[in-house]
Image: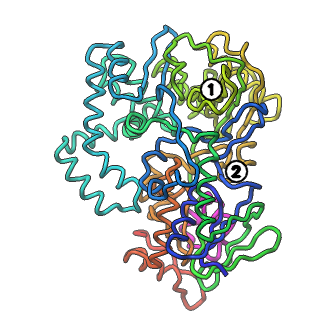
Amino acid sequence: MPDAVVIGAGPNGLVAANLLADAGWSVVVLEEQPEPGGAVRHDRGVDPEFVHDLFSAFYPLAAASPILETLRLERYGLRWRHAPRVVAHPLSDGRCAVLGRTLGQTVASLEGFAEGDGEAWRDLHDVWERLRPDLLDALFTPFPPVKAGARLALRLRGTGGLRLARSLVLPVRRLGEEEFREEGGRLLLAGNALHADLAPEAAGSGGFGWLMAMLGQSYGFPVPEGGAGGLITALVARLEERGGAVRCGQRAVEIVVRQGTAVAVRTADGETFDARRAVLADVSVPALYGELVRPEHLPDQVLKDLERFQWDFATFKVDWALDGPVPWASPEAGQAGTVHLADGVDELTRFAAQLAMGRVPDRPFCVFGQMTTADPTRSPAGTESAWAYTHVPHTVRGDAGDEGITGSWDAAEAERMADRVERQVERFAPGFRDRIRARRLLAPPTLEAMDANLRGGAINGGTTAMHQQLVFRPVPGTGRPETAVRRLYLASAAAHPGGGVHGAPGANAARAALHGRLPGGLARAQRLLTRRDRKGDRRPVPDEW
């Protein structure tokens, strides 16, 4: 019998398993798919000569993560590669905002938009450099980050305090208007904010856009050499060296709970994996509380809150094998691993408004990846392994493009959406379609079939909006990996601090399991949850929990 059973061999599940193994625990990881990785995998399914990442591709949060750093995955074969430039945002008039590998490159690019905008970027970067150590500690440690939060508060007092806090909760449109005279710097912030499901007018989108842009400035947007799965291969090798095991093709269907305690995991083929000390779930919240744990083991309030859980946007992705480099009208875009495609902040707002109305955008904002530019091993010399993703509504109420896309995502609809994405690329790279050797379409149902955590193609484990972060993630009053079931821990992107490949949710769950106890308030709440009245009914969870 292992000490711990981990459900899900995505990066968070594997990080959790590694940390438990480091502490001397025996660990078994159960994975539904035939290979580990979750949303960090690659294949040669588009063309045998081309490597394509199936889901995520660029990893600034992984490069910045102190958790992954401590695992020393380079010893297990992980190698990071970088494009000459980090991010480019071309415009239809030929101008292009560039986030460079060095601060000077970015400053020079933004000075080309307006005198002083480069120096404004330097000022934002100076604030980042002062806050970076404690900000990253606060981001990647369990909530509430008491020690790191206290240090961060002291640093905030020395960098403008309330004024800086105000800037970070601003909508990214307003932050860009306050900091920059012209569109270049505004685009770098807003495009990065839309890596999550944050519209330019959403509260807090300014802080998220600034964080992602500064991570790119400091760490780049690196990629694993040879494909995204190189990160997973290293995590699995490290775990197996410490005696851990990964069992693929094992779909968990039930977490066995006895007397309020998780004691085992049952799989679809009828096998039961007993857990001596803990069960850690690298799964979505609806899967954990709506499927794996029976309702009678959960407080009524948790089940009610689950009805209000909000996913992030659905995702549509296209992979291409290209016979040559992308023919960008702005040559600077050809040097960037990541390219943002929208003709200005107003077009980003238009895109987000169409999504909010349930309409499939007619000019989809695309995050475009040039993988061979970042890692020459991905395809033959002179070619490009490329992809783009955009967002679509979960429930389609209309098609802003008037092509009749309904959200059924059958083969015909997927083809029409892929053509629309390619037309958006052509606006900034005339002749792009002439270089396509092969393409693959990944509509929302396909993404979910390949990784059950990507419900409807949602890639962040739940919305990044402020109403579902911190103590509200995944439902109000939580914010930590502990659950209402003893020895059951949430280890997925649904837990604080959320999506992105950094390992923090898995690490936080592992720490909680190792400590084996709850903070005072949660412990009291859990005792209330397990107390029964004379009729045997479970008492309601207290509001303050």
- Write down the quadrant of residue 79 in the picture: top right
Which structural element holds mark 2? loop
Look at mark 1 in the image and give the residue it sits on: 361
Residue at 74% x, 19% y: name it. 436
- What residue is shown at x 35% (from left), y 16% (from top)? 182
Tell me the residue at 62%/43% (across/down): 228
- Name the main secondary structure of what is drawn in magenta: helix
Q: From this viewpoint, is residue 305 visible?
A: no
Note whether 543 is above or below 153 in the view shown.
below
Q: Is residue 304 magenta?
A: yes
Q: Mark 1: which secondary structure? A: loop
Q: Earlier in the sequence, mark 2 or mark 1?
A: 1
Segment colored magenta: 282-305
The C terminus appears in which quarter of the rendering?
A: bottom left
Pick the residue in front: 244 or 149: 244
Q: Which residue is at a point 69% across and 74% down the rendered structure image?
A: 265
Q: Is residue 51 left or right of residue 523?
A: right
Q: How is the image coloured?
A: rainbow
Q: Which residue is mark 2?
A: 451
* Amino acid type for the residue under numbered disc 1: Pro
Residue 110 spot, x, y in % from top left = 35, 18
